[in-house]
């Protein structure tokens, strides 16, 4: 049991960091991602018969959360409980867990060759770009689907609860991408409506961007997505997208 | 990505070897198993909140199938396809796969302390006794249950297709265990009806036990289960249990 894990491939997704990644797969149907298979497993034979399955399991490493050294904490604070209450790591899907293994079901949309690389085209992944994949298995509905299972402190999917609007600079940036990324506005709306904001806040500039007026607390956020830095403000149940600022090459 | 995996605990089940283990979990409702948690994770805190979930994912190592050295074969021959046709390892749930990782959903029946050991009481596991568990996660029905998924070459659960009867020595052995294991006859019936026989045969004595008469081919089998060696004969769609032979201590 001491051997290390082989990497089957790497996941390519729009998410350049954890912030904005949906907290489970399948919450946003239009999300596309790709598995770029490592050369050791790129022969078609390894994947023969997979095309008959509509969905796959990905087993992967939480490579950003993995604690290198340091003791394993027995509990985590899931966003679902407001980031305050603690539950055991084994009662959560948090990445701060022994072995840092993640599990996600994704839709299989296709398979193609990209030069020497074998690429699986996926739908619905909840993974950061570059996530190392350590196994791929077919989803077996008669064994894996238990719609009547009881889901503890997370009994139902989180609701898309926030209202999303776009400021003028954001509108212009979307218009400039209308041809290459026609689905972008809808995707941003879906991602932000899911309320990705952590209980501990994360302003993109200084803490002074937090202001309080009669309508409550405003807070500014930023996250890297595709090739831009998305910037927005949240106030109560409303999100206003301010701008999509192109990333310089070294930040992608 | 080179760190080795920590063992969260070991699965205790009636299966002393792979033969007779159901090919997916949940096929036999009455099957009981236990996760004996490793001392590093035996504090209650690690498991707080898990009791609210009806089902768990186990991630585990196929410790009996893991190839130590030797090249990874790109294809396997799933029992579902008669053991003849080959599919890619990533289109199968076979244990002969890179990283030897397994994935099973099990029912959570309870949790208890057994001296210093923390024990999770489970239902429906498809694992050999002693299987090392490398992660436990709650089952989230809204994310994990996709009853409409398309299941490729394994679109539905295997049917319990064989008729099971008991010879006199087997009846006597069951009668002697009627008090301690009242569910045993039903369990044996369920396990054997699922047709666990590999396409390549596996007689418990010599190949000469294979005989051919007017009713077809008979074949004798044996497998270790609980504290006995189960012996039976298969002919066409019928299984006759011959005997339950107690195992000597060193074979358990």
Image: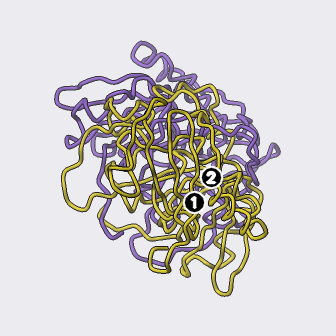
Chain colours: A yellow, B purple
Q: Is residue B131 visible?
A: no
Judging from the image, mark 1 belongs to the subunit labelled A
- Chain of the residue under the numbered disc 2 shown in the image: A
Q: Nearer the viewer, residue A39 or B72?
A: A39
| Picture quadrant where residue A199 is located | top left
Within 10 angstroms of label 1, few (less than 14), some, or many (20 or more) residues? many
Q: Position of residue A36 (x, y in %)?
A: 59, 73
Position of the N terminus of chain A, as image quadrant, is bottom left
Q: Give how far across and how far down residue B39 sits, in percent.
A: 20, 40
Q: List the single residue furthest toward the right.
A: B214
Numbered mark located on residue A167 in the image:
2
Q: Position of residue A38 (x, y in %)?
A: 54, 77
Give the image location of residue A149, x and y in percent: 57, 27
Q: Is residue A117 above or below residue A211?
A: below
Q: Which residue is tagged 1?
A: A243
Please tell me which residue is depicted at 48% across the width and 40% down the height of the picture. B57
- Image point 67% across, 60% down: which residue? A32
Label 2 to label 1: alpha-carbon separation:
7 Å
* Extreme-front residue of the structure: A214
**In the rendered view, would you say A23 is above or below A250?**
above
- Name the residue located 40 percent from the left edge and 32 percent from the top edge: A82
Looking at the image, residue A97 lies above or below residue A113? above
| Disc marking residue B217 | none
Is residue A251 something one can see in this rendering? yes
Which element carries disc 2, helix, strand or loop? Answer: loop
Q: Report the label total.
A: 2
Label 2–label 1 contact, CB within 8 A: yes
The residue that appears at 58% across and 29% down in the rendered structure is A156
């Amino acid at each position: 049991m001491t051997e290390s894990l082989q990497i089957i491939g790497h996941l390519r997704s729009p998410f350049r960091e954890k912030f904005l990644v949906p907290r489970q797969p399948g919450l946003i149907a239009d999300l596309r991602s790709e598995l770029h298979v490592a050369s050791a497993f790129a022969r078609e034979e390894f994947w023969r018969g997979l095309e008959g399955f509509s969905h796959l399991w990905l087993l992967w490493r939480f490579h950003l959360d993995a604690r290198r050294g340091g003791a394993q904490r027995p509990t985590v604070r899931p966003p679902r409980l407001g980031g305050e209450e603690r539950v055991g790591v084994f009662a959560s899907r948090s990445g701060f867990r022994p072995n840092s293994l993640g599990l996600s079901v994704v839709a299989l949309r296709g398979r193609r060759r990209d030069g020497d690389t074998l690429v699986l085209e996926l739908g619905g992944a909840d993974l950061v770009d570059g996530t190392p994949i350590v196994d791929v298995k077919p989803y077996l509905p008669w064994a894996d689907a238990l719609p009547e299972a009881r889901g503890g402190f997370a009994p139902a999917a989180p609701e898309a609860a926030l209202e999303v609007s776009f400021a003028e600079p954001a509108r212009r940036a979307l218009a400039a991408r209308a041809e290459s990324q026609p689905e972008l506005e809808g995707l941003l709306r879906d991602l932000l409506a899911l309320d990705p904001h952590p209980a501990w806040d994360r302003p993109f500039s200084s803490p002074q961007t937090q202001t309080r007026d009669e309508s409550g607390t405003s807070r500014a956020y930023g996250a890297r997505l595709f090739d831009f830095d998305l910037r927005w403000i949240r106030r109560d149940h409303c999100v206003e997208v301010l701008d999509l600022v192109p990333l310089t090459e070294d930040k992608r």
